[in-house]
Image (cartoon, grey):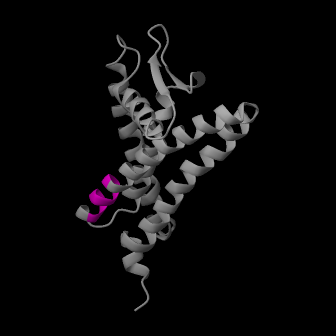
């Protein structure tokens, strides 16, 4: 049994670090969300909606957001037409938690790990706002393609970016990269 554990120790450490990080961050995030029961919509989702509106208004359009007080979403209006609802799941925090869990699992030195987590989280946030803005414009122009756009194309976009960030981390910065580098 001990031989088995030693043989698979790197994999078991990866799984342990991944799931511990994922569980801890998820519990913390759920606690954060629980503090918004009176307001229903959390501050991160509001910020994402506001940033999406600001991005869309950089172009010659009329974009606006309206918070639905009775429900838990923000309505996105594009050129005077309702195009999307922004809910808590649209704020990319769950994607960032997944990203961080993976980086911690392949952690390297503390400073580069923290910098990559911070930088990668900012990249994911910005690309998520861009994703919502592009999705809104495309839904406005192609309303019959909502399922394809929202259900297939844009999840591939955001998870593709996360995958690329993971590959960069593992190949360039993780301890794994240092241990397997060809000299």
Of all residues shown, which one is farthest toward the left?
111
Of all residues shown, which one is farthest toward the right?
144
Could you tell me how many numbered marks the image carries? 0
Residue at the image point whose x is 74% and y is 36% from the top: 145
Indicate yes or no whether the magenta region holds residue 87. Answer: no
Residue at the image point whose x is 53% and y is 58% from the top: 163
The relative height of residue 162 versus residue 169 in the rendered view (above or below) is: above
Compared across the picture, whether 68 is left or right of 139 comes to left
The relative height of residue 88 versus residue 158 in the rendered view (above or below) is: above
On the image, the x and y values in percent for residue 1 come to 50, 63
Residue at the image point whose x is 36% and y is 39% from the top: 25
Q: Nearer the viewer, residue 84 or 17?
A: 84
Residue at the image point whose x is 34% and y is 26% from the top: 43
The relative height of residue 34 versus residue 126 in the rendered view (above or below) is: above
Compared across the picture, whether 51 is left or right of 152 comes to left
Q: Is residue 131 visible?
A: yes
Query: Magenta region, mostly helix, strand or loop?
Result: helix
Q: Is residue 5 visible?
A: no
Which residues are the magenta region? 112-118
Of all residues shown, which one is farthest toward the front?
60
On the image, the x and y values in percent for residue 98 come to 46, 47
């Amino acid at each position: 049994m001990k031989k088995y554990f030693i043989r698979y120790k790197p994999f078991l450490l990866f799984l342990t670090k991944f799931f511990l990080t994922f569980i801890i961050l998820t519990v913390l995030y759920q606690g954060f969300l629980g503090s918004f029961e009176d307001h229903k919509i959390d501050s991160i989702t509001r910020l994402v909606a506001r940033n999406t509106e600001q991005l869309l208004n950089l172009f010659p359009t009329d974009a606006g957001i309206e918070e639905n007080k009775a429900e838990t979403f923000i309505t996105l209006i594009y050129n005077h037409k309702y195009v999307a609802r922004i809910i808590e799941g649209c704020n990319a925090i769950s994607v960032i938690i997944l990203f961080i869990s993976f980086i911690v699992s392949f952690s390297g030195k503390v400073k580069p790990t923290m910098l990559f987590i911070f930088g990668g989280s900012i990249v994911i946030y910005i690309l998520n706002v861009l994703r919502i803005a592009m999705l809104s414009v495309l839904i406005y122009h192609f309303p019959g393609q909502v399922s394809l756009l929202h259900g297939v194309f844009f999840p591939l976009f955001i998870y593709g970016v996360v995958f690329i960030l993971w590959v960069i981390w593992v190949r360039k910065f993780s301890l794994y990269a240092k241990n397997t580098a060809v000299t």
